[in-house]
Amino acid sequence: MDRGQFIPELENVLEIAPGMLREDQNVRDLEHWDSLKLLEVLALADEQLQVQVDADHLAKCVTIGDILNLLEESSGSKGAQQ
């Protein structure tokens, strides 16, 4: 996963101005973060990265960096399975 390409997509889903998303941001501090956004992030990961992430694991993420790390780990394990 290329974070540089994925972050703008994530900013769009989370309704954050381009370039404003920080990896140390707590997702619960984001104005629009809710269960619907969580599902949108799952869909984005599936569509853009062809990676399926467990919703419970995503819900446990505290920061944007945690989400990106989870996506990278999921992407890496997918490649190992193929």
Image (spheres, rainbow, N blue to C red):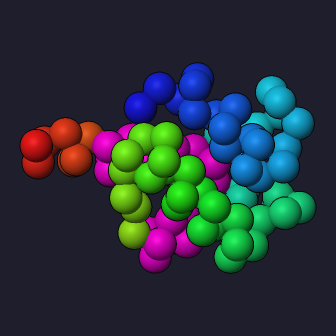
Q: Quadrant of the C terminus?
A: top left
Query: What is the magenta range?
Result: 55-75
Quadrant position of residue 75: top left
Residue 69 lies within the magenta run: yes
- Image coordinates for residue 25, horizontal then vertical, percent: 73, 48
From what the image shows, is residue 12 above or below residue 36? above
Residue placed farthest to the front in the image? 47
Q: Nearer the viewer, residue 48 or 8?
A: 48
Give the dominant element type of the magenta stretch: helix, strand or loop: helix
Viewer can see residue 57: yes
Q: Residue at x 82, y 58 (%)?
A: 30
Residue 48 lies within the magenta run: no
- Image coordinates for residue 33, horizontal then vertical, percent: 77, 65
Q: Residue at x 56, y 50 (%)?
A: 44
Left or right of 57 in this view: 60: right
From what the image shows, is residue 57 above or below residue 20? below
Left or right of 31 in this view: 5: left
From what the image shows, is residue 30 above or below residue 55? above
Q: Residue at x 50, y 65 (%)?
A: 58
Left or right of 74 in this view: 48: right
